[in-house]
């Protein structure tokens, strides 16, 4: 059960705090000017990133193609190496079939 | 586009901003800054933090303006952003731990402010100290309810919580606050 005295004390404190609204006029002064300056700089940073990311698209595409070619070559080399190894020593590879 | 800004409705200023008119957005900020500062000042620790919160509110409003649906006034939308920003600041403050020491502040070149013209009431100091110890959600809900005199429905709209959730959080926040006021240690 709440103590009614402390409840009313709390209500009185809230009422008092409501009356003493913080004075923000000093911080509000010329706020729009500072805000627009910040927006301009934020926009320029954003546009730089947008330009850079668009210009990097061919580089990313080239990287992806290079990776794909490299991957295809690695697979081909591996198949070839397995065939050579089998031809040189078929027993050694057949003995590994229990692993499958 | 040249428009008579002082008498132009908010909706028209929003359209003009979306069309690339920065002056229109400056006018929107000028119109609504007082309400935004009023709410944010209840949560900010100092003038610098207050400025940061309010700038972030309007920067977000500017970049998300296309998401503003015209079904409610622009002011409600901006106050919703303000509430979320204040909550983010409260959470960040809680995560970062206690404020830096006085020695560290003085070493960094900080100069203490001149004393305020009206000496703060000792009981109000106690209330603010207790509010600072509440969890971010509790502090947010009790501040909006008791200091900003918002209704439960309004708080639900500002925070995105259900009305039942707001009621429960407000009840718990008040109980926690009372406990902190009775036993400050």
Image (spheres, helix red, strand yellow):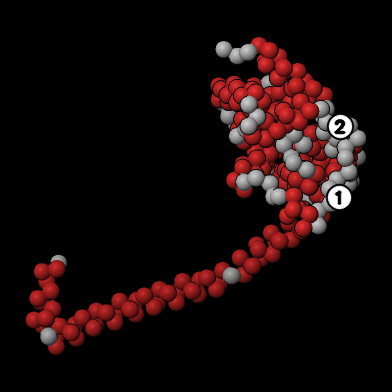
Please tell me how many numbered marks the rendered image carries.
2
Residue A83, x across and y down, in percent:
19, 82
> Horizontal placement of B55 versus A89: left or right?
right
Which tag is nearer the camera, tag 1 or tag 2? 2
Q: Which mark is residue A33?
A: 1
> Horizontal placement of B178 versus B31: left or right?
left
Instruction: Specify the quadrant of the image occupied by residue B73.
Output: top right
Q: Element at badge 1?
A: helix
Chain letter behind tag 2: B
The C terminus of chain B lies in quadrant: top right
Q: Which residue is mark 2?
A: B119
The reply to whether discs 1 and 2 touch (Cβ–Cβ < 8 Å) is no
Q: Element at badge 2?
A: loop
Choose between B158 and B115: the one closer to the eye.
B115
Image point 29% across, 82% down: which residue? A77
How far separated are the C-alphas under marks 1 and 2?
Answer: 32 Å
Residue A35, x across and y down, in percent:
81, 49
Instruction: Specify the quadrant of the image occupied by residue A90.
Output: bottom left
Q: Which mark is residue B135?
A: none
């Amino acid at each position: 059960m709440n103590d009614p005295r402390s409840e009313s004390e709390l209500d009185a404190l809230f009422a008092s705090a409501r009356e003493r609204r913080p004075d923000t006029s000093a911080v509000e002064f010329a706020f729009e000017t500072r805000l627009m300056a910040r927006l301009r700089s934020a926009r320029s940073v954003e546009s730089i990133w947008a330009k850079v990311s668009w210009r990097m698209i061919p580089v990313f595409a080239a990287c992806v193609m290079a990776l794909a070619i490299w991957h295809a070559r690695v697979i081909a080399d591996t198949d070839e190496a397995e065939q050579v190894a089998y031809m040189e020593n078929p027993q050694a590879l057949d003995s590994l079939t229990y692993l499958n | 586009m040249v428009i008579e800004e002082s008498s132009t409705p908010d909706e028209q200023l929003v359209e003009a901003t979306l069309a690339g008119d920065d002056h229109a957005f400056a006018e929107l900020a000028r119109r609504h800054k007082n309400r935004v500062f009023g709410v944010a000042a209840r949560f900010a620790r100092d003038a610098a933090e207050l400025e940061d919160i309010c700038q972030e509110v309007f920067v977000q409003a500017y970049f998300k303006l296309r998401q503003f649906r015209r079904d409610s006034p622009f002011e409600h939308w901006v106050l919703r952003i303000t509430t979320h920003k204040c909550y983010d600041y409260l959470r960040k403050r809680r995560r970062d731990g206690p404020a830096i020491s006085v020695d560290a502040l003085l070493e960094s070149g900080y100069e203490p402010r001149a004393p305020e013209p009206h000496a703060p009431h000792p009981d109000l100091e106690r209330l603010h100290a207790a509010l600072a110890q509440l969890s971010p959600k509790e502090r947010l809900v009790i501040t909006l309810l008791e200091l900003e005199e918002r209704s439960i429905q309004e708080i639900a709209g500002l925070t995105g919580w259900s009305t039942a959730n707001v009621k429960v959080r407000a009840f718990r926040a008040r109980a926690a606050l009372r406990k902190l006021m009775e036993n400050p240690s």
